[in-house]
Image: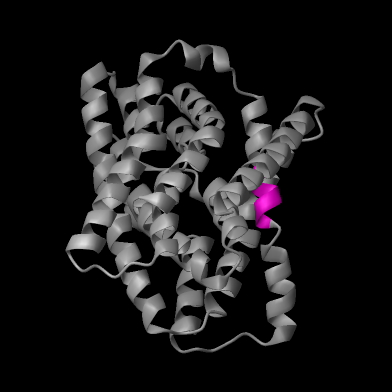
Amino acid sequence: MQTQIIAEQIIIAGVIVLTGAVGSWLKVINDDVRLSISRLVFKITLPLLIVTTVSSMEMSHEVLVNGGWAAFFSVLSMVIMYVAGKISVRIFRLPQRTAVVHELHTMFGNIVFLGFPLVSALYPNEEALLYAAIFYMVSSFMQWTYGIFLLKGQGDVTLKERFRNLLNPNTVAFLVGLGLFLVQLKLPDLLQIPLSSIGKATSPLALLYIGSTLAGTSLKGAMKRADIYLLSINKLVLIPVILLLIINFAVRHLGVELGQMAKTIIVLEAAMPCMSMIVIMAKAFGAADDRAAENVFLTTLLSLLTLPLVYYLASVL
């Protein structure tokens, strides 16, 4: 039944992505509109979705234990992705501008624009989004510290520069929501209902943004690159499967208490296609932003096939 749900959600997501692409081809969604959608999701709808969902959860021992292990395995997934990126860069002997993008795209997935909408559709309850938000917090910390450090050529990077972008609306929303959850303080209905309604707009807006972005990227250039195939295999299948096997070993043989839902969400978040924000960051710091756009394009298309597979494996293994 759950496999059928994820297949249906992938199809629904695909329809919305296609709508965004058509909107771009018809010039309805131009660069200005696309930028506005991105800002709307990142600064308003997603923060509201996170804070209203996390704050409304009921406290329980199971949630606290799962949350702690979710944080641990999220960190572990970053370590696996880091190692995989370093190895694949050496295999292809990529030049610096391309190597930086390849490494960062191996580490960072499209959690905001695909991960959160998918988790919300699969698990329409408050607890599920907590685990997704924990993974996002770990990924965001690495993105705005190590990611900036790498893009700036490992040069003089001040602490202020490293952490300036870390406190973005989504991390702040998670911390606020987590604080309200820990003290079990619920928002009044006059705030909870309208704010959560706005937060629910995150999924369609994010998918429209992805579709409009993909519409402007050529598949031709990506198909000629050998490194993008290894990136796709690592990002979409190999890394999440390795993470899944490690988690299963820890649960079965080391006494780790991690629920099925929390495990599946962590593995799914690790299986997200390449992060679209890396394209913007690469352009800002002089890295190969054209390669980054191709990475996002191909891995997002392939993820429509690999995400159901990863979900199935996480459910049966």
Q: Is residue 293 visible?
A: yes
Q: Which region shows up in magenta? A: 202-208
Q: Residue at x 34, y 32 (%)?
A: 234
Q: Residue at x 54, y 89 (%)?
A: 185
Q: Is residue 310 above or below residue 167?
A: above
Which quadrant is the N terminus positioned in? Answer: bottom right
Q: Residue at x 52, y 69 (%)?
A: 173
Left or right side of 199 for 234: left
Q: Is residue 68 above or below residue 74?
A: below
Q: Is residue 154 visible?
A: no
From the top left corner, tell me how far across and down residue 203 is, in percent. 66, 53
Quadrant in which residue 52 is drawn = bottom right
Say which of 169 and 236 sits in front: 236
Q: How is the image coloured?
A: one colour
Q: Residue at x 69, y 72 (%)?
A: 195
Left or right side of 258 for 255: left
Q: How many marks?
A: 0
Quadrant in which residue 103 is drawn = top left
Give the main secondary structure, helix, strand or loop, of the magenta stretch. Answer: helix
